[in-house]
C-alpha cells in the first residue's frame, strides 16, 4: 500500500535517533540503490560530531531517505540542504520535512555533482553517501573539498574505501556492508 508514492513497508522507514525529533519515523520510496545509513552508523557519526549541531550549515548531497540531513536538523543545525535527483525521493523528503516541522531543511531536486559545481556556498558538515554502485564518491569528495568551510568535516560512506589523498581521516567505522569515515582537508 502506498501513499503519495511512499511505501508503508517497514523496510522503507528510518527512525530519527537523536535531538528534538528523536523517535520520529521517516518514510521513503522503494528505489534501486537507496539504502539509508544504518542507525548504528548514524549514532557513531553524531557521537563524533557532537550531539548538537547548533548553528551549523549542513549538506546531505545524495539525500535518498534524508536520514543524515534530518538527523542534523533534529540536532539543531541552522540550515540543512538535501539534494536528491529522483522525483519520488525528493517528494518524500519534502513530506518528511513538513512532518518534522524542519523549517531549516531545504530540498533541492538536482543531480548531486552538478549541483555541487554550481553556486551553493560553503558548509560546516557535508554528508556523502552516494549509491555504492554508481562510483560517485571520488568526484563527490573532490567537489565537496571546494564547498567545505575551513574547519568543516565530511562524512563519507562507501562499500570499498576510495583514495583519500588530500584528506585526513579523523575517525572510521563499519556497520554491516557500509564503511564510513569522518574527514577533514589535510
Image (cartoon, rainbow, N blue to C red):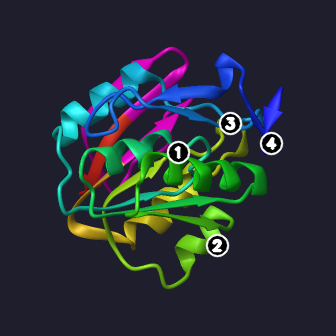
Q: Which mark is residue 16?
A: none
The secondary element bearing badge 3 is classed as loop
Among the two numbered marks 1 and 3 on one chain, the one whose residue lies closer to the N terminus = 3
> Is disc 2 in contact with disc 3, using a CB cutoff of under 8 Å?
no
Q: Is residue 183 left or right of residue 102?
A: left
Among the two numbered marks 4 and 3 on one chain, the one whose residue lies closer to the N terminus = 4
Q: Residue at x 49, y 67 (%)?
A: 143
- Looking at the image, is mark 1 or mark 4 nearer the viewer? 4
Give the answer, above or below, for where 179 lies relative to 144: above
Position of the C terminus by quadrant? bottom left
Between residues 74 and 37, which one lies in front from this camera angle?
74
Question: Is residue 136 located in the magenta-colored stretch of the structure?
Answer: no
- Looking at the image, is mark 1 or mark 3 nearer the viewer? 1
Residue at label 2?
114
The secondary element bearing badge 4 is classed as loop
Among the two numbered marks 2 and 1 on one chain, the one whose residue lies closer to the N terminus = 1
Residue at label 1?
66
Position of the N terminus by quadrant? top right
Q: Residue at x 66, y 46 (%)?
A: 135
> Is disc 1 in contact with disc 4, using a CB cutoff of under 8 Å?
no
Among the two numbered marks 1 and 4 on one chain, the one whose residue lies closer to the N terminus = 4
Residue at label 3?
34
What is the span of residues highlighted in magenta in the rendered image? 155-180
Amino acid at each position: 500500500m502506498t501513499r503519495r508514492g511512499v511505501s508503508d513497508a517497514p523496510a522503507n522507514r528510518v527512525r530519527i535517533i537523536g535531538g528534538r525529533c528523536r523517535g520520529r519515523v521517516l518514510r521513503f520510496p522503494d528505489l534501486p540503490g537507496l539504502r539509508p545509513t544504518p542507525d548504528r552508523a548514524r549514532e557513531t557519526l553524531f557521537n563524533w560530531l557532537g550531539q548538537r549541531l547548533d548553528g551549523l550549515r549542513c549538506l546531505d548531497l545524495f539525500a535518498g531517505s534524508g536520514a543524515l540531513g534530518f538527523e542534523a536538523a533534529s540536532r539543531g543545525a541552522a540550515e540543512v540542504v538535501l539534494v536528491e535527483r529522483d522525483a519520488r525521493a525528493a517528494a518524500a523528503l519534502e513530506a518528511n520535512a513538513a512532518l518534522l516541522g524542519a523549517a531549516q531543511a531545504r530540498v533541492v531536486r538536482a543531480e548531486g555533482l552538478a549541483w555541487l559545481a554550481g553556486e551553493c556556498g560553503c558548509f560546516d558538515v557535508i554528508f556523502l553517501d552516494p549509491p555504492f554502485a554508481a562510483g560517485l564518491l571520488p568526484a563527490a569528495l573532490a567537489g565537496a573539498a571546494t564547498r567545505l568551510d575551513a574547519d568543516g568535516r565530511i562524512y563519507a560512506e562507501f562499500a570499498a574505501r576510495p583514495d583519500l589523498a588530500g584528506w585526513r581521516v579523523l575517525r572510521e567505522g563499519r556497520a554491516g556492508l557500509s564503511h564510513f569515515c569522518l574527514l577533514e582537508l589535510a
